[in-house]
């Protein structure tokens, strides 16, 4: 048996709302971010999940209401939007990994790792991301794998049910 499919926070949050809260939601794949907001504006979808930096700019610009954030706590950049943590004692985080080809040479790997470490240690860079509503956690490859595995375990029920439902 292979590893479970990785689901973004929106998929997991939607699955949670369907399973635990009885919400009638259906996943709809959309290619471009602007297309999501156009579908919402046209009434072809009723709601959408998007990352906080996008939501902060796209939702108000289009006249949409931000209902909640999927994190454990309210986002400091969206103080009027409740969190899944406070509403349902549940949270879903979006996380990304920096991935390189397997054949990447040792020198290139070291330069890339060094540049990523420098960015994650730069106060101005981190302040810029915090202002956008993003909290960065720098992990080495072992730490990232452990975090990924613990996040998958924490959300295993939702992931399994989403996979069974065909929300891939």
Image (cartoon, rainbow, N blue to C red):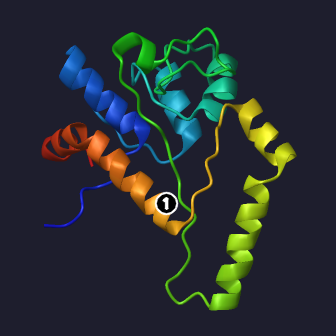
Residue at 64% over, 38% down: 135
Which residue sits furthest top? 80
Disc 1: which residue:
143
Within 10 Å of disc 1 (Cα), the crowding (few <14, some 14-19, many 20+) is: few
Q: Tell me: 74 left or right of 13.
A: right
Q: Total marks drawn?
A: 1
Q: Position of residue 22 (x, y in %)?
A: 19, 15
Q: Tell me: 151 left or right of 138.
A: left
Q: Tell me: 168 left or right of 87.
A: left
Which residue sits furthest right? 124
Residue at 47% over, 37% down: 93
Looking at the rendered structure, the secondary structure element under dot 1 is helix
Of residues 97 and 10, the one nearer the viewer is 97
Q: On the rendered image, what quadrant is the N terminus found in?
A: bottom left
Of residues 80 and 58, the one nearer the viewer is 80
Dividing the picture into quadrants, the one containing residue 79 is top right
Q: Position of residue 90 (x, y in %)?
A: 36, 24
Q: Tell me: 79 left or right of 24.
A: right
Q: Position of residue 109 (x, y in %)?
A: 65, 81
Residue at 16% over, 39% down: 161
Of residues 59 and 127, the one nearer the viewer is 127
Q: Position of residue 132 (x, y in %)?
A: 72, 33
Dividing the picture into quadrants, the one containing residue 29 is top left
Residue 23 appears anywhere in the view: no
Dividing the picture into quadrants, the one containing residue 43 is top left
Residue 54 appears anywhere in the view: yes
Residue at 44% over, 13% down: 86
């Amino acid at each position: 048996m292979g590893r479970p499919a990785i689901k973004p926070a929106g998929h997991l949050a939607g699955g949670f709302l369907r399973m635990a809260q009885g919400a009638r939601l259906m996943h709809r794949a959309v290619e471009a971010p602007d297309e999501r907001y156009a579908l919402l504006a046209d009434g072809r979808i009723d709601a959408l999940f998007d990352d906080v930096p996008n939501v902060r700019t796209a939702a108000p610009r289009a006249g949409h209401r931000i209902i909640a954030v999927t994190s454990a706590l309210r986002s400091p950049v969206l103080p009027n939007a409740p969190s899944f943590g406070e509403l349902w004692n549940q949270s879903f985080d979006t996380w990304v990994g920096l991935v390189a080809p397997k054949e990447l040479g040792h020198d290139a790997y070291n330069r890339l790792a060094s540049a990523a470490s420098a960015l994650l240690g730069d106060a101005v860079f981190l302040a810029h991301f915090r202002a956008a509503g993003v909290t960065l956690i720098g992990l080495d490859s072992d730490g990232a794998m452990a975090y990924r595995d613990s996040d998958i375990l924490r959300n295993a029920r939702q992931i399994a049910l989403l996979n069974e439902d065909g929300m891939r």
